[in-house]
Amino acid sequence: MKNVVESKNLSFSYNGILALSDINISIPQGKFVSIVGPNGAGKTTLLKIILGLIKNYSGTIKVFDKNPDEVDPALIGYVPQFKTMDRKFPAIAIELVASGIIRKWPWRIRGKSKQLAYEALSLVKSEHLAERSLSSLSGGELQRVCLARSFVRNPKLIVLDEPATGIDAIGESDLYNLLENYQSKSGATVLMITHDWHVALHHSDLVLLLNRRQIAFASPKEALSEDNLRIAFGHIGHQHNFRGEN
């Protein structure tokens, strides 16, 4: 099985401050991988390196056997944090989805682009939202539209940065079901930042636990052990029990 992402001794400093140190990971095709760690742990920095947005790192990293900035953008679907989006931007849902096709804002949507955008909305059961303004969407609805945008070019790697932030428990469960359905049908790899280690435990094949350095990269149960979580987060305040276990 090919590795979609592979890094060796990957490190990055920002203004002299070490953000990531010696990250060594191999992510096989088709796996669901969660990146877990406290605020400031370097999680989003790692995603930016994988997406080719940060280039002045040390060590090596390959994405689809290429340097990140050389990867065909059509291979990667990206769902950013909600806080990076301007909900007041005067646009409708299908325009946001279509922007994932041409990588810029589509002032007119027609032909194949419109068809692909509707198909992507259909994948997340949200065709009815196509003509709705972004400002009128609930958090869960907007996240579905963002997910549709990431699916629109049938990518082989889906990258998500805290996708459940700002949505309720039902919307969160729905999000993960849609994500896993796409993965099972497409064989895509999923790489997701989450602060919730229970989510990582129950949805992941592998977990990367970070606090600037790599604490663990292993199965969820192994990576999210009590000892590892204490190293990553400090005192976590209670005995850590895995759901479904005594």
Image: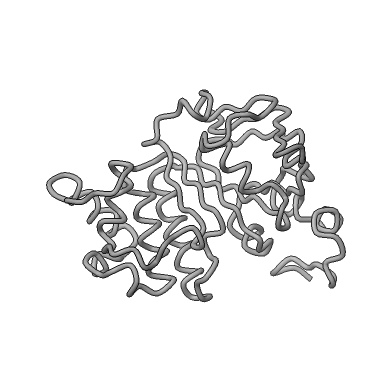
**Image position of 46 with respect to 134: above or below:** above
- Quarter holding the N terminus? top right
x and y percent of residue 104 in the render? 31, 44
Q: Is residue 66 above or below residue 236?
A: above
Q: Residue 69: x and y, percent?
A: 49, 29
Against 80, is 86 above or below? below
Report the number of discs: 0
Please provide percent x and percent y for residue 80: 49, 54
Q: Is residue 27 above or below residue 181?
A: above
* Horizontal side, residue 198 vs residue 127: left or right: right
Q: Residue at x 51, y 76 (%)?
A: 168
The C terminus - image quarter? bottom right
In-image side of 29 versus 91 (left or right) = right
Q: Quadrant of residue 123?
A: bottom left
x and y percentages locating residue 150 in the rendered image: 39, 49
Residue 34 appears left or right of 72 = right
- The scheme the figure's colours follow is one colour
Residue under the image location 30 percent in, 49 percent down:
99
Give the side of residue 242 with respect to residue 147, left or right: right
Q: Nearer the viewer, residue 161 or 128?
A: 161
Residue most toward the left?
111
What residue is drawn where x is 49% and y is 62%? 82
The residue drawn where x is 35% and y is 72% is: 137
